Image (spheres, helix red, strand yellow):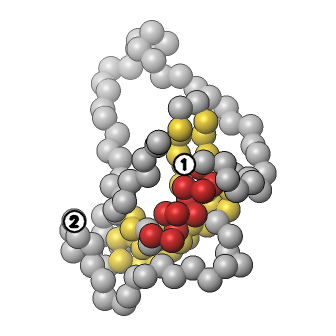
Amino acid sequence: MTQIDTDKKIDMSFGEGETCEYCGGDIVEKRVTLHRQIKDKHVLLEDVPAGVCRQCGTRYYAANVLKTIEEHIRGRLKADREIVVSVYSMSKQKNAGIATRRKIPTRKISAPITEK
């Protein structure tokens, strides 16, 4: 897992009274954990500063935070530690007894991280 460097002053650029562009809810500043998968590599980022909508949970990230996230994902910054993760497959063959399948909704982020 990787932590965003909290020693640096991070301007989150979220002013009081800002509202969500999707539902109109209030945006509050929080520290969140992100999971990203790039090909076969999984990355966890902890203590990421974000604006989070109180109503729908949409997350907003300042440009400098997105740049730091990209540096971590691209491997330019060293990870604080590594962990072992158990992997479970819920493929159709292994779980034929499941009666219903639903698509789990994903959260929107204001500026998607793209892979080059």
Q: Nearer the viewer, residue 62 or 19?
A: 62
Label 1 environment density (alpha carbons within 10 Å; few <14, some 14–19, many ≥20): few
Residue 84 position, x and y percent, is 74, 37
The residue furthest bottom is 16
Q: Which residue is mark 2?
A: 22
44 over 29 or under it: above or below: above
Residue 17 sits in quarter = bottom left
The residue under label 2 is which amino acid type?
A: Tyr
Task: Identify the residue at image location x=61%, y=36%.
Answer: 41
Residue 47 position, x and y percent, is 61, 66
Task: Identify the residue at image location x=58%, y=30%.
Answer: 40
Element under disc 2: loop
Can residue 33 be seen from the camera position used here? no
The residue furthest front is 116
Residue 93 position, x and y percent, is 45, 9
Q: CA distance from mark 2 to mark 1?
A: 23 Å
Element under disc 1: strand
Label 2 environment density (alpha carbons within 10 Å; few <14, some 14–19, many ≥20): few
Residue 34 sits in quarter = bottom right
Can residue 21 be seen from the camera position used here? yes
Q: Nearer the viewer, residue 89 or 61?
A: 61
The residue under label 1 is which amino acid type?
A: His
72 over 93 or under it: above or below: below
Q: Which residue is mark 1?
A: 35
19 over 38 or under it: above or below: below
Task: Identify the residue at image location x=44%, y=72%.
Answer: 62
Residue 113 position, x and y percent, is 44, 52
Q: Is residue 22 left or right of residue 16?
A: left
